[in-house]
Image: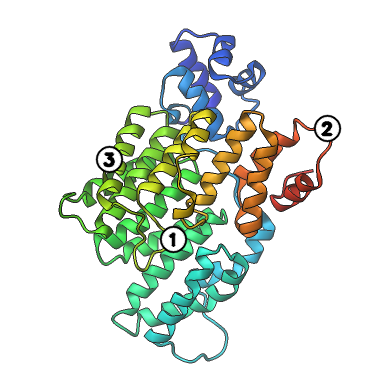
């Protein structure tokens, strides 16, 4: 994997007996882009582009690229979250502080959960530094303090992944996994780790890690608890997500079928008592099936599946409903229904503006719409500012 993507692309294309023009036709990409890639003039290949090339060449995406250059947080975001990162690595607070108690830290963590569910990032950025420091101290004072710290590390890793601070997120999640008390707690952390790997384009790592843990946590469906089904099903969805991006449709569909079996056995949407950010059930599986359809460029199927999702049975959080709505907006944009695409984006902005501003996917969708317009409506201009669309 030492060669760049251009060299690998040229080698695989020649092995397949395809010309550059034939590859452009089969992949739906421009001939000029393929020429620039093979000549080494472009190395910033996006995962979507690599998957389309891999699909045309009938090879896994990871044959062409080991890791995509996923956009990380802007410097202004990095600066805003610096206190959280300092607390994460254990920077001691200045001055003498009152010794934390288990009840006090547990209550503070419980009170913070609505902020996580509501994507209220600004408020979380203010409360997390002292909470992380208190949890660190508590872990050395109380037998149950370690479990509180693991939970807080899981949540911090999830939040840092959401805000595209990937290195810090990986540090938090590795600490949480190292200190997990049992396999279900570990599976919860691994689920987020796999999401982090997916966002960074580390498809092989995501697929292998999710597969390993899914195998280890697979329950007997007839006797499984909701916690076991949720953990296993969630990992299977990660296997499917990594596989479909790696152009392994058979593996993606197999994992999705197993996840559906777990959801049917569950019979409802379920969130672990202390992990309401992670839901699993029939609706979640339906959302992820639509997401897979968008990955393989089937906007028609996305819109069809979207009509089958019961909108009133799932809390619109960033890791389920809103992500699905971005797929719906993208499907509208790709089928030239630009007004509907904008309407969906506007709805997300109204309900969760801080979440939307961190989504490069939203910027891509809006850029596609804007490129087809001579002039922008006031709503489009407002959205462009909300998603930080470059001028």
Query: With 59 as the anchor, is 217 left or right in this view?
Result: left
Q: Is residue 75 above or below residue 378?
A: below
Q: What residue did someone put label 1 on?
A: 277
Determine whether label 3 and label 1 are within 8 Å by CB.
no
Q: Is residue 192 above or below residue 113?
A: above
Q: What residue did someone put label 3 on?
A: 258
* Residue density around tag 1, few if under 14, some if 14–19, many if 20 or more, within 10 Å: many
Give 275 or 59, whichever is nearer the viewer.
Answer: 275
Give 279 or 74, whichever is nearer the viewer.
Answer: 279
Residue 118 in view here = yes
Give 389 or 40, whichever is nearer the viewer.
Answer: 389
Mark 3 or mark 2, earlier in chain: 3
Distance between mark 1 and mark 2 Cα atoms: 41 Å
Query: With 254 as the anchor, is 94 left or right in this view?
Result: right
Q: Secondary structure at mark 1?
A: loop
Image spot of residue 303 (x, y percent): 53, 34
Q: Residue at x 60, y 71 (%)?
A: 123
- Rendering quarter of residue 15: top left
* Residue density around tag 3, few if under 14, some if 14–19, many if 20 or more, within 10 Å: some
Image quarter of the C terminus = top right
Image spot of residue 238 (x, y percent): 38, 44
Give the number of the disc on residue 188.
Answer: none
Image spot of residue 313 (x, y percent): 44, 54
Q: Secondary structure at mark 2?
A: loop
Give the number of the disc on residue 374.
Answer: 2
Q: Residue at x 46, y 36 (%)?
A: 305
Mark 3 or mark 1, earlier in chain: 3
Q: Is residue 78 above or below residue 36?
A: below
């Amino acid at each position: 994997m030492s060669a760049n993507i251009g060299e690998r692309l040229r080698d695989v294309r020649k092995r397949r007996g395809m010309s550059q023009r034939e590859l452009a036709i089969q992949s739906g990409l421009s001939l000029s882009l393929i020429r620039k890639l093979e000549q080494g003039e472009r190395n910033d290949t996006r995962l979507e582009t690599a998957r389309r090339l891999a699909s045309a060449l009938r090879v896994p995406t990871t044959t062409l690229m080991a890791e995509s250059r996923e956009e990380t947080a802007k410097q202004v975001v990095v600066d805003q979250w610096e206190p959280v990162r300092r607390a994460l690595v254990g920077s001691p607070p200045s001055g003498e502080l009152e010794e934390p108690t288990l009840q006090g830290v547990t209550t503070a963590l419980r009170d913070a959960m609505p902020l996580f569910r509501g994507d209220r990032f600004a408020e979380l950025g203010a409360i997390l530094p002292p909470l992380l420091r208190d949890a660190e101290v508590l872990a050395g004072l109380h037998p149950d303090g370690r479990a509180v710290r693991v939970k807080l590390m899981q949540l911090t890793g999830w939040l840092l992944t959401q805000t595209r601070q990937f290195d810090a997120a990986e540090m938090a999640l590795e600490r949480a996994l190292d200190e997990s008390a049992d396999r279900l707690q570990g599976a919860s952390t691994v689920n987020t780790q796999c999401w982090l790997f997916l966002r960074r384009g580390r498809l092989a790592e995501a697929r292998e890690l999710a597969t390993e843990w899914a195998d280890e946590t697979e329950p007997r469906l007839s006797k499984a608890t909701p916690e076991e089904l949720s953990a296993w099903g969630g990992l299977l969805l990660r296997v499917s997500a990594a596989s479909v991006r790696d152009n392994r449709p058979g593996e993606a569909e197999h994992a999705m079928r197993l996840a559906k079996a777990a959801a049917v056995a569950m019979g409802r949407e379920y969130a672990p008592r202390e992990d309401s950010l992670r839901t699993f059930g029939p609706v979640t599986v339906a959302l992820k099936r639509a997401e897979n359809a968008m990955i393989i460029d089937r906007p028609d199927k996305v819109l069809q599946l979207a009509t089958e999702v019961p909108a009133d049975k799932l809390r619109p959080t960033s890791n389920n409903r809103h992500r699905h709505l971005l797929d719906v907006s993208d499907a509208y944009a790709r089928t030239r229904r630009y007004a509907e695409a904008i309407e969906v984006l506007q709805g997300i902005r109204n309900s969760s503006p801080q979440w939307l501003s961190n989504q490069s996917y939203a910027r891509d969708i809006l850029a596609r719409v804007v490129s087809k317009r001579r002039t922008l409506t006031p709503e489009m201009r407002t959205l462009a500012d909300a998603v930080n669309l470059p001028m």
